[in-house]
Amino acid sequence: MGIASLIIVFLVSGSVGISQPTEAQENPFDTEVDERIGGRVFLSECGRCHGRDAKGNDETGAPDLTRGRLRTASTDAGLFQVIRDGIPGTAMIGIGWAPDPTIWQIVAYVNTLRIDPGDYDLPGSVDQGQRIFYGKGNCASCHMVQGTGGRRGPDLSTVANRRKPEELKTDLTDPDDTVEPRWWTLKVTRADGSVFEGLRMNEDTFTLRIMDADENLWHFSKKELRSIERIETSTMPSVTGTLTASELDDLVAYLFSLRKESGT
């Protein structure tokens, strides 16, 4: 979690006192900024059990948080209490050490994982958007949907479970707005002067692995490298100037149709 995000969290915490939430209480921290901060805290504190994609873990017994209504928490207040206090008799432990605003921000993030398509009436055409995805937009050269497409960008098979239509539009028009470390590019130079560039697939203290534009994997020992340049912008070009406004609406409509249906 970045310093700026921590500052926001603790400034909010210091200025607002939140008592025990009532069952009907709605989340007072549900802006897009809150969702982003909550997502970062989720990755660091909850992702170890629930998975970085929040799809659960059979080994730990942590449930998939992206599918339907949660059995133990049907309201924001209920989810707040589960995150703060945990669930007795299970592996779910709370994070009661965190300030209330931070817990509410995690609630806001978890709610984005279960986006209800019925809340949106989009102007675009799903069918037209699919044709743009595989045609004019050339999206499938980097992105995979249901096993078809490239690997140089995130798998979009269930993107609608975690991204709202307005967020999808921002992703398409301003790809540099939010770039997760998984999609950073590394430019590495060996001691002999040879240069390699590709997506950052894995990195630890001693080694790193990248995938180049042809989807070849390269593994390096850091001690053999002369330099490592980290590029934190997106490799994805903006569709602005390539797609018309109506084509952008169509593409958003198609992407928002890509979801994992909720279980019973």
Image (tube, rainbow, N blue to C red):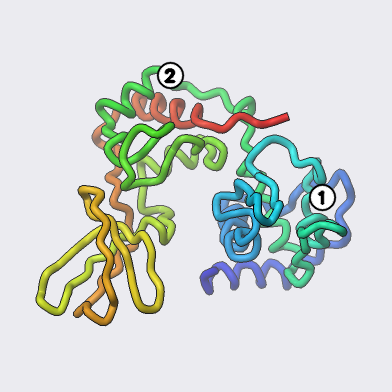
Q: Quadrant of the N terminus?
A: bottom right
Q: Is 43 above or below relative to 56?
A: below
- Residue 45: x and y in percent read 64, 65
Element at label 2: loop
Task: Work out whether mark 2 precedes mark 1 in sequence or the reverse, and give the earlier one.
Answer: 1
Disc number for residue 53: none
Residue assigned mark 1: 77
Instruction: Indicate left or right for 54 with 141 as reference.
Output: right
The residue at 55%/42% (across/down) is 162
Residue drawn at x 57%, y 61% as measured from the top left: 40
- Which mark identifies residue 125? 2
Image quarter of residue 151: top left
Where 107 falls versus 264 (above or below)? below
Residue at the far front: name it: 59
Determine the residue positioned at 78% across, 50% down. 79
Q: Position of residue 167 (x, y in %)?
A: 48, 42
Work out whether residue 33 can be spotted: no
Q: Tell me where residue 83 sits by quadrant.
A: bottom right
> Does residue 212 appear in the picture of this structure?
yes
The three-letter code of the residue at mark 2 reads Ser
Q: Position of residue 71 (x, y in %)?
A: 80, 41
C-beta proximity under 8 Å, tags 2 and 1: no
Q: Amino acid at mark 1?
A: Ala
Q: Mark 1: few, some, or many residues within 10 Å (few <14, many ≥20)?
A: some
**Does residue 195 sit above or below 213 in this rendering?**
below
Q: CA distance from mark 2 to mark 1?
A: 37 Å
Q: Quadrant of the C terminus?
A: top right
Numbered circles on residues, count: 2
x 41%, y 61%: residue: 181
Quarter of the image for residue 188 reads bottom left
**Mark 2, residues whose alpha carbon is within 10 Å: few (<14), some, or many (≥20)?**
some
Determine whether the residue tagged by mark 1 lies in a helix, strand or loop: helix
